Amino acid sequence: MSEFTRAEIDEFWQGWLEANREAERRRDWRVLADHYAEEATYGWMYTPDEHFMAVGRAEIRELAIGQEMAGLDGWHYDYQATVVDERTGMIVGFWKQRSGITNDETGEEYEILGIGGSWFGVGRNVDGSLEFAWQRDWFDLGSTAQTFLAIAASGKAPPGLLDRMGVHGPSQPGHYRLQDLPSPVWPPPVERGDFVVQDRPS
């Protein structure tokens, strides 16, 4: 029997979406950190040998949704679709990454193309409330670079975004080579095979 009900996960997720909108209004995503477990991990891949990983709520607050979101104030991440599995306590959310900056040629916002999203594992706090035990993101890095460069070429890039573009990523806190990652690319329970749902070839 599942540890979670669909109703409580849905309620938790709605609270997460509301918190995201508030973070975008404030232009500060660090307010989202309270949704994570004290020992949660949050990571993604930039290149096959450059990964980001935050370990623990403090690093998630300061690095994942602090340092790594620098220069992206005014951007918004609108979830287009959500898939919930209450049996495993997992949520997958697919979002579009839009800049809030208008392209004068098209009249539309500059947007990072390709499919982006977040994969979450839900856990339960000691008080019984839900929280995220882990999160892994994916996005189109090539499209991200192209969009950043297009905004810069338009003359509309704010100073924070230009500063971000000049940062040497691998030297930043939380960036690791693959073999040095403090938590695996695949979330720990999935990496262990806790959720294998098909037979392996004999």
Image (cartoon, grey):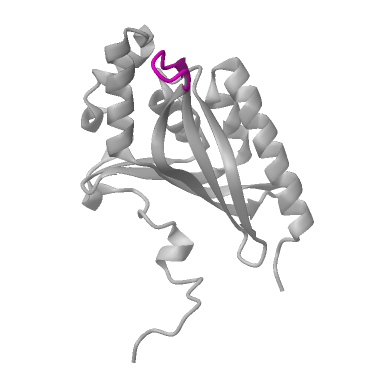
Where residue 59 appears, as percent x and y from the top left, is 45, 33
Give me the residue at 43% from left, 45% from top: 115
Residue 41 vs 151, above or below: the answer is below
Please say whether residue 104 is one of the residues in the magenta stretch: yes
Q: Main secondary structure of the magenta part?
A: loop
Asked whether 170 or 95 is in front, the reply is 95
Q: On the image, which quarter does residue 28 sit in?
A: top right
Range shown magenta: 101-108
Q: Position of residue 202 (x, y in %)?
A: 34, 92
Q: Is residue 150 above or below residue 154?
A: below
Kindly tell me whether residue 61 is visible in this rendering: yes
Q: Along the line of sight, which residue is nearer the eye, 104 or 110?
A: 104
Left or right: 130, with 171 as reference point: right
Q: Is residue 160 magenta?
A: no
Q: Give how far across and how far down residue 15 sits, in percent.
A: 71, 38
Q: Is residue 13 above or below residue 163?
A: below
- Residue 166 at x, y = what percent? 23, 18
